[in-house]
């Protein structure tokens, strides 16, 4: 019955109590939301590339190789010669191999030369394939397929011409060989969204008239001539490799790393991603710390509300005292109030999180390529709710002690 | 004796010269006593002493034959719950509780009083009817009642489980003269049937006619305000 009265008392102060509960709910939802985004970001980070067993490039660091080959950040220090590439491709362990040739750009986006096998073998988010939203994959030498972000940012559509610049952030264009956009890819949330994909032969074709980083003066091979040229590449930047049997991955990796004719490096994408995440992961910890502070702030807000309520509730406490309630009962009432508020707040926060997730999930996926899975409340969420309740007990001890003192001093007569 | 005070002296902590002393006060079983005094004559302090929310520096206070001086704070709270029904001047009720919640509140802290009430619901209804409260008022929120109704609910709360003593602090001051009389009549009808003693403090001498005995505060107590 005392509990019922405590709840009735809370209802009587519905506005302030409601606001306090809302603050706790929002902070809990924020905290859990940050956790979800963090987990989602980590998962989608790890999902950037899947189904590829090895990434091969010139010898450098594994993170660097991952960064330039998959994330298109930084540049390769060296290339892999076409001969070495062929050697690897012909090894018995290799199921498939996709070459990647980087180095040119269009506006702020990188241009990647590859083969159509890229569309078959590049997988992200647990085995999803790239999907063409509009148009078709590369069929002509001067066809380009662009990622969703490229299309959106530059407002490009199928059929639009696109001129590739030589190098990155360069002023020299491959003006004489304009590409035509043949297809636009679906949003993936991977660096593919920010990539212009052309054929490996096209990369060779636009460089036919170039030598050593500069254009040969006065030379311009017509497109028709280029289309019939063999255009075998001299080198590729990196290659994605799939093995026939997962057990052979390490054998192949070792063979590539010990390749005698050229210093090469083969990395397991998952391992390199983990390594990279351990560097990027610092930011997530900071974000988490901030959201913990928000929860603490909300709880201190509740403490302030309880404090503020004390002066207007001296009469209520005096009545309880006159009826024979001990000061500890008054103390307990305050604690019960805090627990009820914090529990409601935490539970509403969890509910709010799921509501927001349900509404925002498709939107977040479409705009940021971040997949936030909706799963049943995990043990972690239960712990968060419990932690909020325990923390609420701790912060409400201060106003409860104050209420205890007031009720001892006032007794049953309010001294005003 | 339901209530007995001997050589009671109380000094407010931290205030020199601000003290109350009551050499002798006895209230017999079933007796109704009006304590008359101006405001600031120490009435409230005396009530707090009797209720055990403050302890005298000297002397003894017994309720129903039990000396409360040597009891722990918790025991005194318990005794207050069991033995004393308290009625305030006004704002007696928890505004967010129903009439029923308010009437049953003391029983929560007083198991023996609760034992005396056989069925809670019937007892609440009986008391409400006896105090001329409208039928079905039990489920109404206390803050929707008129002042007169609130005071009668407060009486019902003080009487439930029949404590030996009812203490009232100017319960009629918020009521008009006609209502005052009917209020006292209803109160005494109830206390008389269970031989309950009543001690009421007031500044209004016109209430005197209704009581067995009228005591002036200044006759039984000396109160010093000292220098402030």
Image (tube, coloured by chain):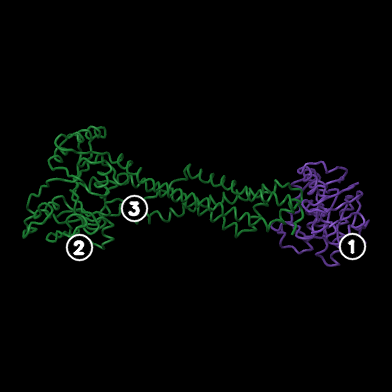
Q: Position of residue A19 (x, y in %)?
A: 56, 58
Residue B76 is left or right of residue A271, and the answer is right
Query: Relative to the observer, which residue lies in front, A20 or A214?
Result: A214
Question: Do badges 1 and 2 share one subunit?
Answer: no
Q: Which mark is residue B207?
A: 1
Whether tag 1 and tag 3 are in contact, CB under 8 A, the answer is no
> Circle 2 sits on which residue?
A160
Kind of element beneath mark 1: helix
Q: Position of residue A133 (x, y in %)?
A: 26, 56
Which corner quadrant of the image does residue B66 belong to? top right
Kind of element beneath mark 3: loop
Tell which subunit mark 2 falls on. Answer: A
Please identify which colour was used for chain B in the image: purple
> Circle 3 sits on which residue?
A369
The first of marks 2 and 3 along the sequence is: 2
Kind of element beneath mark 2: loop
Tell which subunit mark 3 falls on. Answer: A
Q: What is the C-alpha distance between the residues marked 2 and 3?
A: 25 Å
Please tell me whether residue A257 is drawn above or below residue B54 in the rendered image: above
Please identify which colour was used for chain A in the image: green
Q: Nearer the viewer, mark 1 or mark 3?
A: 1
Which corner quadrant of the image does residue A194 belong to? bottom left
Residue B90 is left or right of residue A22, and the answer is right
> In the image, what residue occupies the spot 87% across and 63% down?
B204
């Amino acid at each position: 019955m005392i509990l019922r009265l405590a709840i009735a008392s809370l209802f009587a102060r519905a506005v302030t109590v409601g606001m306090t509960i809302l603050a706790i709910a929002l902070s809990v939802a924020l905290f859990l939301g940050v956790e979800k985004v963090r987990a989602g970001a980590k998962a989608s980070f790890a999902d950037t590339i899947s189904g590829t067993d090895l990434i091969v490039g010139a010898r450098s660091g594994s993170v660097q190789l991952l960064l330039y080959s998959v994330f298109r950040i930084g540049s390769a220090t060296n290339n892999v010669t076409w001969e070495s590439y062929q050697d690897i491709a012909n090894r018995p362990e290799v199921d498939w191999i996709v070459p990647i040739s980087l180095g040119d750009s269009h506006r702020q986006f990188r241009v990647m030369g590859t083969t159509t096998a890229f569309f078959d073998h590049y997988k992200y988010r647990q085995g999803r394939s790239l999907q063409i939203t509009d148009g078709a994959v590369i069929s002509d030498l001067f066809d380009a397929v662009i990622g969703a972000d490229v299309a959106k940012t530059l407002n490009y559509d199928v059929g639009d011409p696109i001129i590739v610049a030589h190098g990155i952030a360069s002023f020299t264009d491959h003006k004489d060989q304009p590409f035509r956009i043949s297809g636009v890819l679906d949003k993936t949330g991977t660096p593919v969204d920010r990539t212009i994909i052309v054929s490996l032969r096209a990369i060779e074709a636009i460089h036919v008239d170039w030598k050593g980083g500069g254009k040969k003066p006065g030379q311009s091979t017509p497109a028709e001539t280029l289309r019939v040229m063999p255009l075998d590449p001299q080198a590729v930047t990196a290659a994605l490799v799939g093995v026939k049997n997962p057990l052979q991955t390490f054998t192949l990796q070792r063979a590539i790393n010990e390749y005698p004719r050229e210093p090469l490096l083969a990395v397991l994408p998952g391992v390199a991603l983990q390594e990279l995440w351990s560097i990027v992961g610092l930011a997530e910890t900071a974000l988490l710390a901030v959201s913990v502070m928000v929860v603490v702030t909300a709880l201190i807000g509740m403490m302030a509300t309880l404090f503020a309520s004390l002066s207007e509730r001296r009469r209520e406490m005096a009545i309880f005292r006159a009826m024979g309630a001990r000061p500890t009962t008054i103390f307990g009432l305050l604690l019960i109030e805090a627990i009820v508020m914090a529990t409601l707040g935490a539970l509403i926060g969890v509910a709010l999180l799921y509501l927001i997730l349900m509404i925002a999930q498709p939107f977040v996926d479409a705009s940021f390529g971040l997949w936030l899975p909706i799963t049943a409340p995990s043990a972690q969420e239960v712990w968060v709710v419990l932690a909020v309740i325990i923390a609420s007990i701790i912060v409400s001890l201060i106003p409860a002690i104050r209420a205890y003192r007031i009720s001892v001093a006032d007794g049953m007569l309010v001294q005003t | 004796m339901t209530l007995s005070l001997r050589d009671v002296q109380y000094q407010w902590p931290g205030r020199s010269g601000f003290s109350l002393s009551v050499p002798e006060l006895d209230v017999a079983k079933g007796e109704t006593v009006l304590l008359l005094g101006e405001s600031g004559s120490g009435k409230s302090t005396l009530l707090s002493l009797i209720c055990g929310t403050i302890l005298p520096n000297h002397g003894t206070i017994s309720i129903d034959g039990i000396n409360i001086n040597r009891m722990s704070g918790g025991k005194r709270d318990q005794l207050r719950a069991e033995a004393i029904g308290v009625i305030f001047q006004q704002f007696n009720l928890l505004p967010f509780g129903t009439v029923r919640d308010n009437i049953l509140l003391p029983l929560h802290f007083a198991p023996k009083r609760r034992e005396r009430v056989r069925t809670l619901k019937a007892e609440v209804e009986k008391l409400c009817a006896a105090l001329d409260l409208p039928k079905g008022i039990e489920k109404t929120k206390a803050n929707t009642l008129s002042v007169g109704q609130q005071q009668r609910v407060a009486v019902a709360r003080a009487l439930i489980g029949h404590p030996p003593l009812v203490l009232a602090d100017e319960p009629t001051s918020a009521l008009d003269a006609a209502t005052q009389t009917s209020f006292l009549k209803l109160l005494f009808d109830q206390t008389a049937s269970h031989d309950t003693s009543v001690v009421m403090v007031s500044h209004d001498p016109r209430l005197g006619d209704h009581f067995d005995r009228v005591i002036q505060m200044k006759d039984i107590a000396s109160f010093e305000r000292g220098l402030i």
